[in-house]
């Protein structure tokens, strides 16, 4: 029978917290959750985004000995957490499809010998029969189920593989199970406990009310109005970190291009990008090289960036849970942050279309329920904060928040009208709004330390946030330590971090005192059109341009087609295979060029949509004189 590690001494917990994480105190409920796991009890935990749920199972894993097995749904998330823990001096590993067989086998052998304090597995990997047999030979201390709402059919991200996690109780009867989620309604919470067969679990729910978040919902009549509001918001938050969520991959890329045309640098993030490209863009945003990231819902899980000043949605999310989780990535440092939902009527049609694709009648019913709830939220005239709390089964004692549009809050960028917009655009681009710095943290020093962090991350080939978090940099700039003892007093710098980076940090602060400053930012990028035209002139193919500009080929073809149709670019016959050109032209002569579908139906199946778009653009724009020409490729 397992011997549980019961820690009665608060000083012992605080010492471990300080030593490994560099924190002086726990967040609400964290210490109680840690004690529940250390005492060998099951636990069901609901901590909103930014509440520090990962520490609740990582700290017990360090103190208990043996190996805590963490079930996580995302490969990238488990890899990042394992790497962060290793950087803190906590032996950790993962087994997933990203590892080759030889590496995976070595990790599994090491795990049997008790080499790791935490071991991350995907639910798909865990429920394999050979995995259960292997885990029986691993000194497992407890199981932690992350994103536990995925186990419930009533959850907004139901995954069938999670349903099989109930086998853990049958196969490892003496091991405690702790379930964690950031967003679960009362029904989902009960389902989690039932499906995992938790035994009289300790239950922890932190309030869903995030008073520092300012919810703003606005229905936009046109795409032009939507992009205008987005640009105002980004200019109002110039120099600050912002996440923009778009509903489709095409809209992600179009939005990035629209922003670039207006002098706002942003990076895209979506599932069709190559893995390395996604990681590079995420890292550029995490390290503050680029302040704005435009992504689909593929972005965000496990992102540890406290100083996000705005999260802006460009469409209705599919559920309140999804919106709460994504919007909750703003303001994790406790400072005010804007959560803007700029939706259009057509969003409801897109959601309805996706729901109609669901074949399972029960799941379709649940999807429609979520649809009606989120639509009511967008159209509601009641306090946004209160509506969210009530959705998750919490009944606030207050009825007015003063931090949402319904209760009278309206940010300056939302108030600005075209005639007034100069004041918003004229806002100087600082490294970060001074209001969000600790009083003693000079913005220039924060930016200098960020530059040091970027350079260190490049040298070590690890993401910048694994070197130091934003919160640690802020506290470092505020305290400006002059000795190693002082470095250890900085929030977020534990013993391992101080040993590895303390001397470098002290030297960097000394250089700053002697007059060193961060290098000025690089010039703004060219507009997407100018960039594409320049690449065409240099002889690049459309496929090469897509790779260079980190866009799908279809997006580049669409832009080039528009330029051709408007007469700004001469059609290049090399873009279309010679044997297809005449066939497309013949079909266009028969069916006209108003629509592409009839042409596609009339030509050979191997002729691609992109080829048809390019030829049709030439035919539509035949009356225009091209302003730019490129050499034939």
Image (tube, rainbow, N blue to C red):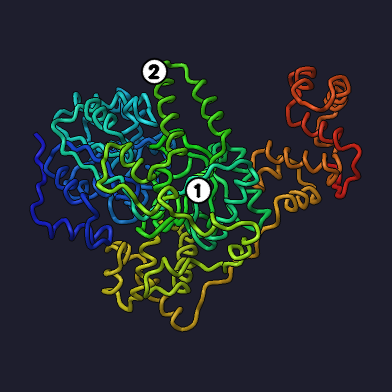
Can residue 100 be seen at all in this image of the molecule?
Answer: no
Q: Position of residue 626 (x, y in %)?
A: 88, 46
Q: Residue at x 22, y 37 (%)?
A: 44
Q: Is residue 232 shown above or below 547?
A: below
Few, some or many C-alpha atoms within 10 Å of disc 2 (few <14, some 14-19, many ≥20)?
Answer: few
Query: SS at mark 1?
Result: strand
Q: Is residue 357 above or below residue 296?
A: above
In percent of the image, x 8 and y 52: which residue is there?
Answer: 8
Q: Which residue is mark 1?
A: 312
- Measured in 3D between alpha carbons, the distance from the residue under mark 2 to the one under mark 1, in whole angstroms, is 31 Å
Instruction: Indicate the position of residue 617 as horizontal and vertical percent values.
Output: 81, 35
User: How many discs appear?
Assistant: 2
In the displayed structure image, the side of residue 156 where residue 110 appears, left or right: left
Give the vertical position of 621 relative to 309 (above or below). above
Quarter of the figure that contains the C terminus: top right
- Say which of 433 and 11 sits in front: 433
Q: Is residue 269 toward the left or the right of residue 30 in the image? A: right
599 to the left or right of 377: right
Check disc 2 and report the residue beneath it: 362
Graded by Cα atoms within 10 Å as few (under 14), some (14 to 19) or many (20 or more), the crowding at tag 1 reads: many
Q: Please report whichever mark, 2 or 1, sits nearer to the chain's N-terminal start.
A: 1
Q: Is residue 456 left or right of residue 438?
A: right
Residue appearing at x 13%, y 38% in the figure:
41
């Amino acid at each position: 029978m397992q011997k549980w590690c019961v820690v009665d001494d608060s000083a012992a917990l605080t010492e471990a917290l300080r030593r490994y994480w560099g924190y002086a105190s726990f967040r609400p409920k964290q210490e109680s959750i840690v004690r529940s796991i250390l005492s060998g009890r099951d636990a069901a935990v609901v901590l909103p985004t930014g509440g520090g749920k990962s520490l609740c199972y990582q700290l017990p894993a360090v103190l208990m000995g043996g190996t805590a097995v963490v079930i996580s749904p995302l490969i990238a998330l488990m890899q990042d957490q394992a790497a962060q823990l290793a950087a803190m001096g906590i032996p950790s590993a993962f087994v997933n499809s990203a590892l080759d067989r030889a590496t995976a086998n070595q990790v599994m052998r090491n795990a049997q010998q008790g080499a790791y304090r935490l071991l991350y597995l995907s639910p798909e990997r865990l429920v394999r029969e050979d995995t259960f047999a292997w885990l029986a030979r691993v000194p497992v201390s407890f199981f932690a189920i992350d994103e536990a709402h995925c186990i419930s059919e009533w959850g907004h991200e139901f995954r069938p593989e999670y349903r099989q996690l109930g086998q853990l109780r049958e196969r490892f009867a003496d091991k405690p199970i702790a379930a964690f989620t950031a967003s679960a309604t009362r029904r989902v919470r009960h389902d989690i406990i039932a499906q995992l067969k938790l035994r009289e679990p300790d239950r922890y729910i932190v309030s869903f009310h995030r008073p520092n978040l300012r919810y703003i919902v606005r229905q936009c009549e046109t795409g032009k109005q939507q992009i205008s509001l987005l640009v105002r918001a980004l200019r109002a938050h110039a120099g600050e970190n912002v996440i923009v969520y778009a509903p489709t991959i095409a809209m992600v890329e179009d939005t990035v291009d629209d922003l670039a045309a207006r002098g706002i640098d942003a990076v895209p993030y979506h599932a069709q990008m190559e893995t390395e490209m996604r990681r590079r863009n995420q890292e550029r945003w995490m390290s503050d090289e680029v302040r704005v990231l435009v992504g689909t819902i593929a972005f965000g899980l496990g992102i540890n960036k406290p100083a996000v000043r705005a999260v802006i949605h460009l469409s209705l999310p599919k559920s309140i849970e999804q919106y709460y989780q994504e919007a909750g990535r703003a303001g994790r440092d406790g400072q005010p942050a804007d959560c803007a939902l700029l939706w259009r009527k057509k969003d409801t049609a897109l959601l309805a279309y996706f729901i109609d694709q669901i074949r399972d009648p029960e799941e379709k019913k649940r999807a429609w329920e979520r649809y009606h709830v989120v639509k009511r939220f967008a159209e509601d005239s009641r306090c946004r904060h209160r509506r969210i709390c009530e959705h998750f089964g919490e009944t606030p004692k207050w009825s007015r928040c003063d931090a949402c549009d319904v209760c009278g809050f309206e940010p300056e960028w939302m108030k600005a009208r075209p005639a007034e917009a100069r004041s918003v655009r004229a806002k100087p681009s600082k490294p970060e709004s001074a209001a969000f710095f600790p009083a003693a943290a000079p913005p220039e020093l924060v930016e200098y330390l960020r530059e040091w962090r970027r350079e260190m991350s490049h040298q070590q080939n690890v993401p910048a946030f694994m070197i130091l978090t934003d919160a640690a940099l802020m506290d470092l700039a505020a305290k400006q330590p002059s000795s190693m003892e002082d470095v250890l007093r900085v929030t977020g710098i534990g013993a391992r971090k101080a040993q590895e980076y303390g001397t470098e940090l002290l030297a960097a602060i000394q250089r700053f005192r002697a007059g060193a400053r961060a290098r000025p930012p690089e010039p703004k990028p060219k507009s997407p059109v100018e960039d594409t035209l320049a690449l065409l002139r240099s002889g690049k193919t459309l496929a090469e341009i897509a790779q260079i500009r980190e866009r799908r080929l279809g997006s580049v073809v669409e832009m080039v087609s528009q330029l051709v149709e408007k007469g700004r670019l001469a059609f290049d016959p090399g873009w279309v295979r010679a044997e297809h050109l005449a066939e497309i032209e013949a079909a266009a002569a028969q069916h006209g060029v108003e629509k592409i579908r009839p042409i596609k139906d009339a030509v050979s199946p191997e002729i691609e949509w992109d080829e048809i778009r390019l030829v049709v653009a030439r035919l539509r724009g035949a009356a225009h004189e091209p302003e730019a020409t490129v050499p034939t490729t």
